[in-house]
């Protein structure tokens, strides 16, 4: 089967986004605060990453509660009842339980009843976009009418490790629906690129992820984000200039900007979804929150391209067309990003149960 195309470049005809919601905790810690705790220059570290601060989960928050918050906003936007959901897929690398699904807890809290499919997904930071693709497939096949895709993380990082500067917290929830519902955005085409490329990892039972420093993160990220985007453009016979907005996974500010430069993506195309300087990298939520930010601020008929990335390694690429201008409200990410409570490093460690 050499040269065989595994993912068809067919356009979806029956799937659109009918609701979406992002949730970012109000707690923040400045990157400089973390750096200076370990005797490093706060200004230099923040500048090297392009990240000013990161969002921190509260003491009583985890991937499930973050996902619930985002889902409630998405349900309000969709104007549907939780019982309408035919599937709930939760993507995270910080599921509260190793054995016990997050999806059924989310469904119970939302009041979704019992007549729905749920499964937890893991693929480092790209599980949220993969949840979207799987639900879109179920809708296109006619098996369900509506499904909820969640990417949520209260990201782990070992105290003093390089990951600690950016590993953040947040959740994005996307409700996809069939033509029976009014679409806020239409899903057009999807594609994926996957390989066994070392990056960072966490074995069962270990609390924090491991990585090989500069020998992993960068090369793996660029191989997949650039490779997936280029493959998607070739398959769909589109150009990067065809898209008004582009969201690339944001582990820090420098990586997506460098990938964008290689792909010919302008600052204007990146701007609406570029949240990382203010919230850090909320792992599975990063790409979804970028997309949600674009949907909240973008204009009708504008086209959006999203390429996520997950360590281990893989990327999903998705294209959408905005179908409706969204009315601004207090649940928007823009409002949430202005509601900030700064904490010091000691409080940060307490929140995470380290001390």
Image (spheres, rainbow, N blue to C red):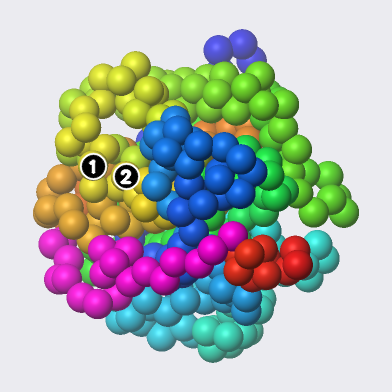
- Relative side of 3 to 12, left or right: right
Within 10 angstroms of label 1, few (less than 14), some, or many (20 or more) residues? some
Residue 62: image quadrant is bottom right
The magenta region covers 324-345
Q: Is residue 271 visible?
A: yes
Residue in the foreground of this view, choosing between 176 and 284: 284
Q: Residue at x 39, y 47 (%)?
A: 52
User: Relative to residue 130, is residue 143 depicted above or below?
Assistant: below
Q: Residue 66: x and y, percent?
A: 53, 71
Residue 203: image quadrant is top right
Cα separation, mark 1 vs mark 2, equals: 5 Å
Residue in the foreground of this view, choosing between 96 and 101: 96
Which residue was labeled with disc 2? 274
- Assign the C terminus to one quadrant of the image: bottom right
Which residue was labeled with disc 1? 271
Q: Residue at x 66, y 19 (%)?
A: 215
Element at label 2: loop
Q: Residue 122: x and y, percent?
A: 67, 50
Identify the residue at the far right of this view: 205
Q: Are marks 1 and 2 in contact (CB under 8 Å)?
A: yes
Residue in the foreground of this view, choosing between 321 and 257: 257
């Amino acid at each position: 089967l050499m040269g065989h195309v595994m993912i068809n470049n067919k356009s979806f005809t029956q799937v659109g986004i009918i609701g979406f919601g992002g949730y970012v905790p109000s707690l923040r810690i400045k990157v400089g605060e973390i750096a200076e705790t370990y005797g490093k220059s706060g200004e230099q570290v923040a500048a090297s990453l392009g990240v000013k601060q990161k969002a921190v989960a509260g003491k009583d928050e985890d991937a499930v509660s973050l996902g619930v918050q985002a889902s409630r906003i998405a349900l309000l936007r969709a104007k549907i009842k939780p019982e309408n959901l035919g599937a709930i897929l939760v993507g995270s690398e910080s599921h509260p339980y190793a054995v016990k699904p997050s999806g059924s807890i989310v469904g119970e809290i939302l009041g979704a009843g019992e007549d729905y499919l749920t499964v937890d997904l893991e693929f480092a930071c790209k599980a949220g976009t993969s949840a979207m693709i799987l639900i879109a497939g179920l809708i296109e096949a006619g098996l369900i009418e509506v499904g909820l895709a969640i990417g949520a993380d209260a990201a782990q990082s070992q105290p003093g490790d390089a990951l600690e500067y950016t590993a953040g917290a947040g959740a994005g929830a996307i409700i996809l629906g069939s033509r029976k519902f009014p679409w806020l955005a239409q899903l057009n085409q999807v594609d994926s690129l996957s390989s066994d490329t070392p990056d960072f990892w966490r074995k069962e039972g270990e609390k924090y992820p491991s990585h090989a420093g500069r020998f992993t993160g960068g090369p793996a990220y660029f191989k997949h984000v650039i490779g997936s985007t280029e493959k998607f453009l070739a398959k769909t016979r589109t150009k990067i200039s065809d898209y008004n907005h582009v969201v690339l996974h944001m582990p820090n500010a420098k990586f997506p900007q460098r990938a964008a430069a290689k792909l010919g993506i302008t600052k204007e195309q990146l701007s609406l979804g570029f949240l990382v300087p203010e919230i850090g990298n909320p792992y599975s939520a990063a790409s979804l929150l970028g997309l949600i930010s674009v949907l909240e601020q973008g204009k009708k008929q504008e086209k959006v391209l999203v390429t996520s990335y997950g360590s281990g390694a893989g990327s999903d690429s998705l294209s959408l067309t905005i179908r409706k201008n969204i009315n601004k409200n207090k649940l928007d990410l823009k409002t949430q990003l202005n509601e900030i409570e700064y904490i010091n490093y000691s409080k940060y460690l307490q929140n995470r149960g380290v001390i």
